Image (spheres, helix red, strand yellow):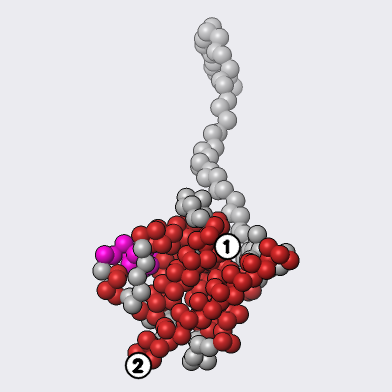
């Protein structure tokens, strides 16, 4: 029997010390996130919401405001045309009645200080001619016109009127205004009776002025009078 073969295994060991390897964790790539703002949905407004903040206007108030605006426009158009006529040198050729410069200045002053009087005169003359004639039944309304004119004259600050001439001025101004309104068709009168109408109106104004003058005389004795001071 042969001898066993002995094989020597020589292992060479490197004396260098090897550091333990660092284990790297796998990296997860995160996609950027878009932040979405929350959408606030407003509720649909109800009929109550739409009307709760609306100021309710009374129908009567609206009507009154419209009437007032119309009245202002009427007054403005009346007085503007009257001023134009008063400043027109050919006025005496247009009307069948003349006024002096003092009366003209008084009328212009009334327009400036109390234009509402011309709205009153249009309204009252409309009442007077509503029946198609002018007679003694219209005296009360004519007296009201004279009283309102007297009040307008007493309000004037830029014109001085002698006390004894107030009645005279009232008569002249009122006659002029009536003639002017007829000429400008503010008072609708048939042309064939226009002259007679104006003549009757002038006579009624004179009659009313006489009544007022008489009342002023009685006032001195008894305290009664037509005009209120």
Image coordinates of residue 25 in percent, x first then y, are: 57, 30
Q: How many marks?
A: 2
Q: Residues within 10 Å of mark 2 (few under 14, many from 20)?
A: few
Of the two numbered discs 1 and 2 on the same chain, state the one appearing first in sequence. Answer: 1
Tag 2 secondary structure = helix
Image coordinates of residue 151 in percent, x first then y, are: 57, 62
Magenta-colored segment: predominant secondary structure: helix
In this figure, which residue is indicated by the disc labeled 1? Answer: 151
Q: Quadrant of residue 55?
A: bottom right
- Left or right for 7, reference 183: right
Q: Residues within 10 Å of mark 1 (few under 14, many from 20)?
A: some
Instruction: Give the answer, above or below, for where 135 lies relative to 4.
Output: below
- Left or right for 229, reference 16: right
- Please name the residue shown 46% across and 85% down the image: 200
Q: Is residue 84 magenta?
A: yes
Which portion, as a residue range, is magenta? Answer: 80-89
Residue 1 or residue 126, whichever sits in front: 126
- Please name the residue shown 58% across and 79% down the image: 141
Measured in 3D between alpha carbons, the distance from the residue under mark 1 to the one under mark 2, in whole angstroms, is 35 Å
Q: What is the number of the mark on residue 192?
A: 2
Residue 85 or residue 210, whichever sits in front: 210
Residue projecting furthest to the right: 222
């Amino acid at each position: 029997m042969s001898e066993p073969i002995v094989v020597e295994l020589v292992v060479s060991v490197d004396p260098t010390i090897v550091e333990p390897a660092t284990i790297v964790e796998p990296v997860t790539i995160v996609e950027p996130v878009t932040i979405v703002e929350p959408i606030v949905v407003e509720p649909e407004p109800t009929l109550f919401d739409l009307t709760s903040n609306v100021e309710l206007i009374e129908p009567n108030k609206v009507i009154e405001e419209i009437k007032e605006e119309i009245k202002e426009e009427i007054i403005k158009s009346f007085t503007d045309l009257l001023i134009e006529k008063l400043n027109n040198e050919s006025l005496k050729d247009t009307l069948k009645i003349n006024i002096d410069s003092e009366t003209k200045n008084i009328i212009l002053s009334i327009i400036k200080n109390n234009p509402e009087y011309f709205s009153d005169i249009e309204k009252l003359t409309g009442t007077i001619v509503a029946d198609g004639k002018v007679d003694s039944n219209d005296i009360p309304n004519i007296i009201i016109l004279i009283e309102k004119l007297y009040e307008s004259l007493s309000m004037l600050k830029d014109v001085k009127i002698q006390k004894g001439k107030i009645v005279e001025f009232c008569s002249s101004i009122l006659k002029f205004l009536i003639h002017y309104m007829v000429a400008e068709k503010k008072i609708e009168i048939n042309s064939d009776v226009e002259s007679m109408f104006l003549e009757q109106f002038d006579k009624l104004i004179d009659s009313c002025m006489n009544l007022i003058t008489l009342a002023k005389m009685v006032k001195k004795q008894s305290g009664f009078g037509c005009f209120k001071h």
